Amino acid sequence: MSTANRLKHMTQNSIWIVTNDAEPVTGEGQRGWSEEVRRRIAGFKEVKLPVAELEQKMGDFLQVVSRLFKQAEQQIDPASEMRLEEVELLVEISAKGEVKLVAGGEAAGKGAITLKFKRSDSR
């Protein structure tokens, strides 16, 4: 296999993830603010992850989320005429390839993927 083909094959089988392991900047007071920013910037790192591993972990995550919302929908009293129409999730991929659900306020300042699911049928 030529070098160009090997590089193309490697690119298709892996993906680069940029993460930041530094603690969030608190914004408390003006003193030391530039040091906090430098620390945050220094915390960025690039990690190459196997696509197959990421696909498996995302698939597992989506199966669990699907079960949770299916169960929630089954708990709704049919007489209430309510139904789940749409679900929007913020998801983060860690440097280890872990797929994590991001809770409300924790999404600030982070790069998260928004997954938006809408009901396809019109019951």
Image: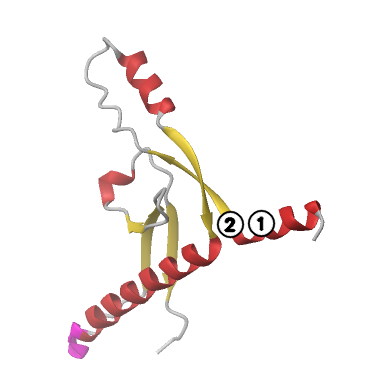
Disc 2 secondary structure class: strand
Q: Quadrant of residue 116?
A: bottom left
Q: Which residue is mark 1?
A: 10
Relative to 10, residue 64 above or below = below
Give the spatial CA distance, label 1 vs label 2.
6 Å
Q: Residue furthest top?
A: 31
Q: Main secondary structure of the magenta part?
A: helix
Relative to 112, residue 83 above or below = below
Verify whether residue 68 appears in magenta.
Answer: no
| Left or right of 29, for residue 12 | right
Q: Magenta stretch?
A: 75-80
Q: Residue furthest front?
A: 1
**Image quarter hosting the C terminus:** bottom left
Whole-percent x, y for residue 96 in the image: 40, 52
- The residue positioned 34% from the left and 57% from the top of the image is 100
Residue type, mark 2 in image? Ser
